Amino acid sequence: MKIFKIYLYTIIIGSLTISGCSTNSPYGLKPNYDQNSAKIIALLPVENKTFDNKTSQLLRSRLFEELYFKGYSKLPLDVIDKKLEYLYLEKKSKKSAAIIEPQLLKDLVGADAGMYCTLTEENKSKKIFYSPITIAVRCELRSTQTGEVLWNAEGKSTSRNFDLTHKGLERKSKETYETVIEEVVNKVIKTLPDGPNLRG
């Protein structure tokens, strides 16, 4: 009887979809983007609408690396954070929205565009034999000269993990966690035009 149950569970698991979401990510691009394209992008801390700071930090690190591979010059995150620290503290003390105006980034860190990203969804639900992970992010690129939005995009990715044991399910969830982050970042960044270091 026990063998039969295990066999039955295996059939059920095998019949469910394991791959993540494959839908195209919605995005917008300013007309004549090439004439107003950014060369140096300041990637601000990811705004978090969930309760997991680890995910927003991993998202930012991954976005930072992908911007470099897209042909944009690296502007170190610690430099950005140090320059903007007092502004965040000032806004927090005034209980105002902790959004740094893009025009400030030009003088403070020498960027000609700021990237503002928000972690809009994070779901790590756990069920018997099944533990899906969903992460969604929204980003926009704003000119530090005019403040206008040059580009924006949204991405969402889901991983569905299955195992007959709790320990096995925990292990698979940890293994796929960063993979889901990588997938959602790739979905967003692939819609951003190549930077000057690739265009030549």
Image (cartoon, rainbow, N blue to C red):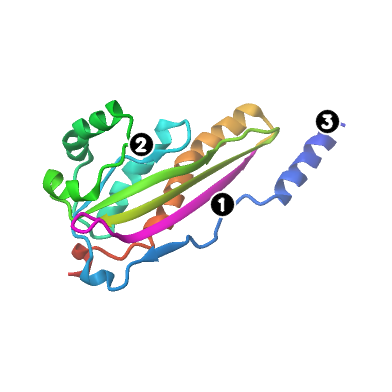
Q: Residue furthest bottom?
A: 32
Who is closer to the viewer here, 188 or 171?
188
Q: x%, y% of residue 31?
A: 31, 72
Q: In the rendered view, does 65 fall on the left or right side of 109? A: right
Crowdedness near tag 1: few (<14), some (14–19) or many (≥20) residues, C-alpha within 10 Å: some
Can you say which quadrant of the picture contains the N terminus?
Answer: top right
Segment tinted magenta in the rendering:
143-162
Q: Residue at x 69, y 34 (%)?
A: 164
Residue for badge 1: 20
Helix, strand or loop at label 2? It is: helix
Residue 27 appears left or right of 10: left
Label located before the other in sequence (3 or 2): 3
Question: Residue at label 2?
Answer: 57
Q: Residues within 10 Å of mark 3 (few under 14, many from 20)?
A: few
Q: Nearer the viewer, mark 3 or mark 2?
A: 2
Classify the position of the C terminus by image quarter: bottom left
Closer to viewer: mark 2 or mark 1:
2
Q: Quadrant of residue 186?
A: bottom left
**Marks 2 and 1, the one that precedes in the sequence:** 1
